[in-house]
Amino acid sequence: MNILCRFPGAAFGEPAGADAFDTWTLSARRLLNPGSLGQPSYEIELVTKEGPLPNWHSGALVELRPGPAVAARRYSIASVQTEGHLRLLVRQARHAAGLGLVSGWLTAHASEGAEVELRLLANPTFELVEDARPCIFIGNGSGYAGLRGHLRARVERGHYRNWLLFGERQRAHDAFFAEEVGHWQAQGRLERVDIAFSRDQPERIHVQDLLRAAAVDVRRWIGEGAVVFVCGSLEGMAAGVDAVLEDMLGRAALDDLIAEGRYRRDVY
């Protein structure tokens, strides 16, 4: 996902000391939401052209371009290094003039085996906590990428106090995450799951509505030390989540969560 928005005071621009771009290979591509009312979303898998995969922390980003003449775009990494590839969730950008340069290349124009220039970027304002304290993961759409990386890392560490609140359009076409999430929940590795499919009923229900309805439990988890992670669209979802948390906790308490590093966002 690209164009991150951070809390005031967090810099966003050319990363200091960033590594040079390396050559990777597009190894697989899969459409995730055929028939969706929204733009097509694709799972993109990438592997290094030479040598082993580098290490990265869940929550990290990639900066990616088809070649040096094209401006790079940033996306959240949806996988962990032990899975053997780097995975992205890319929503195809469509404009009056056609597809977005990078998203269109990744999702439509590039063939499997195509080379891509890529570098890893740390994302310190969205890094996962190392300990086993409870975590609440909130997001929508392609924001599942950043949340999925964290959930996979938590599962591998044996940290199972995880709560996912997530929103998409329709269960029939946009539930690309459901099998994996259901598997984790059945194994006891994901304590609670709340999903909003906004277009499946006459009244639109979004992830921030689920959050408000679960206020008692949200306050309890936060009282137990939970860290809140938000990943997805800034307008609508992230702004709505922020407003609900402020109503639920009070502005001062929400500011305290931010200061303590317990409210971490990767929104665009």
Image (cartoon, rainbow, N blue to C red):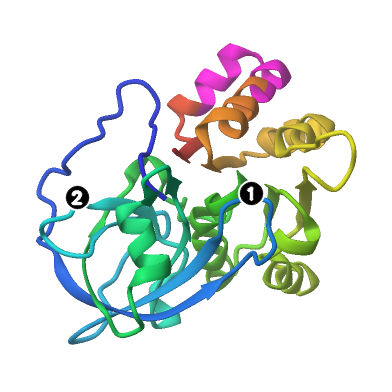
**In the rendered structure, which disc, 1 or 2, sits on the residue that comes first in sequence?**
2
Pointer 1: residues within 10 angstroms few (<14), some, or many (20+)? some
Give the prevailing secondary structure in the magenta stretch. helix
| Alpha carbon distance from label 1 to label 2 | 38 Å
- Other-residue count near label 2 (Cα within 10 Å), few / some / many at <14 / 14–19 / ≥20: few
Residue 187, horizontal then vertical, whole percent: 76, 74
Quick one: SS at disc 2? Answer: loop
Name the residue nearer the viewer: 38 or 85.
Answer: 38
Q: Which residues are magenta?
A: 244-257
Name the residue located 56 percent from the left edge and 71 percent from the top edge.
Answer: 31
Q: Which mark is residue 134?
A: 1
Q: Residue at x 50, y 69 (%)?
A: 43
> Which element type, helix, strand or loop, lies under badge 1?
loop
The residue positioned farthest toward the front in the image shown: 97
Q: Is residue 264 visible?
A: yes
Q: Nearer the viewer, residue 242 or 127?
A: 242
- The residue shown at (73%, 62%) is 173
Name the spot of residue 92 as percent of width and height, x first: 47, 56
Does residue 262 appear in the picture of this structure? no
Amino acid, disc 1 = Pro
Residue 225 image position (x, y, % from top left)? 62, 39
Amino acid residing under circle 2: Ala
On the picture, is 206 further left or further right than 240? right
253 is within the stretch colored magenta? yes
Q: Which mark is residue 71?
A: 2
Disc 1 + disc 2, Cβ < 8 Å: no
What x and y, as percent, mark residue 64?
25, 59
Q: Which mark is residue 2?
A: none
Nearer to the camera, 142 or 226? 142
Residue at position x 33%, y 47% in the image: 123
Q: Is 100 placed above or below 96 here?
A: below
